[in-house]
Amino acid sequence: MLLVIDVGNTNTVFAVFENEELKHSWRCKTETSRSSDEYAVFLKQLFDLIQIKWSDIHDVIVSSVVPDANFHLTGFCQKYVGNEPFFVDANSCDIEIDLDNPDEIGADRIVNAVAVAANYSLPAVVIDFGTATTFDVIDKGGVYRGGVIAAGIRLSAEALTKRAAKLPQINIEKPDKVIGKSTMAAMKSGMYWGYIGLIETIISKISDEMGCKPFVVATGGLAPLYAEELSIIDIVDDNLIFKGLVEIYKNEQNK
């Protein structure tokens, strides 16, 4: 079995694959101070639920955008799984990266690009609704051309609450009307319709630069909510990062 790990700025997700079939996945808050033993306790409880053992895991592949978390994750893999984890970076996958400095790209964006190139029509754009809202462009030849990074939706809402004394915390949801009749309703409208406008404009500008409408894949926790309103989104794929990690692992095994 293969253990895949996606370390994001907000959450860390673990998934177990057997012959490319997703068996189970789990999520926890990303904490750089979490020790290798704490990772083991967390996963052991979950492994017991699906009746697998440490010895069933033969390899580990990791996408991480939090360098401070990598030390303890490596220690966990060495101590409990018995091997070194494979960390994805710009030099570890078979995709051309057309950036001024390829080494600065986040591992999650590389993995998403690999997943889209392997599973969907090209050219394509990945919209990832994470701590940041990112747009990643893959051309018809499978080359990663760059993208856009905007503040994440929940991050924006939290920033408003923290920096403005009278603004409350809100849930991210589609409001009934654009014009809010209360502070909370107005904030919900801004977080929903404001990002609808942002996404539509960015995809329109990307399409103009590419000379065509790309296939648009959305992923991340809020993707389904925004896809309901956005016809420019062709598909929502909650497991895109997993598909990319498995694809990179397969390519590494075949080298």
Image (cartoon, rainbow, N blue to C red):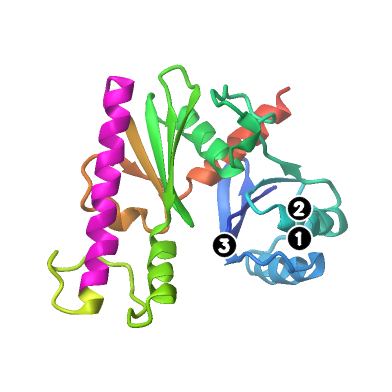
Q: Residue at x 33, y 75 (%)?
A: 170
Taking depth in this image into account, of 107 and 21 the one nearest to the observer is 107
Q: Is residue 42 shown to the viewer in this render?
A: yes
Q: Residue at x 86, y 52 (%)?
A: 82
- Image coordinates of residue 243 in percent, x first then y, are 53, 41
Q: Is residue 136 magenta?
A: no
First in sequence: mark 1 vs mark 3: 3
Residue farthest top in this picture: 141
- Image coordinates of residue 31 in percent, x first then y, are 67, 67
Q: Residue at x 79, y 68 (%)?
A: 35
Q: What secondary structure is found at the residue carrying circle 2? A: helix
Q: Which mark is residue 8?
A: none
- Which amino acid is tagged 1? Lys
Taking depth in this image into account, of 95 and 24 the one nearest to the observer is 95
Is 243 situated left or right of 209 in this image? Answer: right
User: Which stretch did the figure color magenta?
Assistant: 186-213
- Which amino acid is tagged 3? Asn
- Image coordinates of residue 66 in percent, x first then y, are 66, 54
Q: Picture quarter containing residue 80?
A: bottom right
User: Mark 1 packing: few (<14 Cα in 10 Å), some, or many (20+)?
Assistant: few
Q: Which residue is mark 2?
A: 56
Q: Which residue is mark 1?
A: 53
Q: State if disc 3 and disc 2 touch (CB < 8 Å).
A: no
- Image coordinates of residue 111 in percent, x first then y, are 56, 38
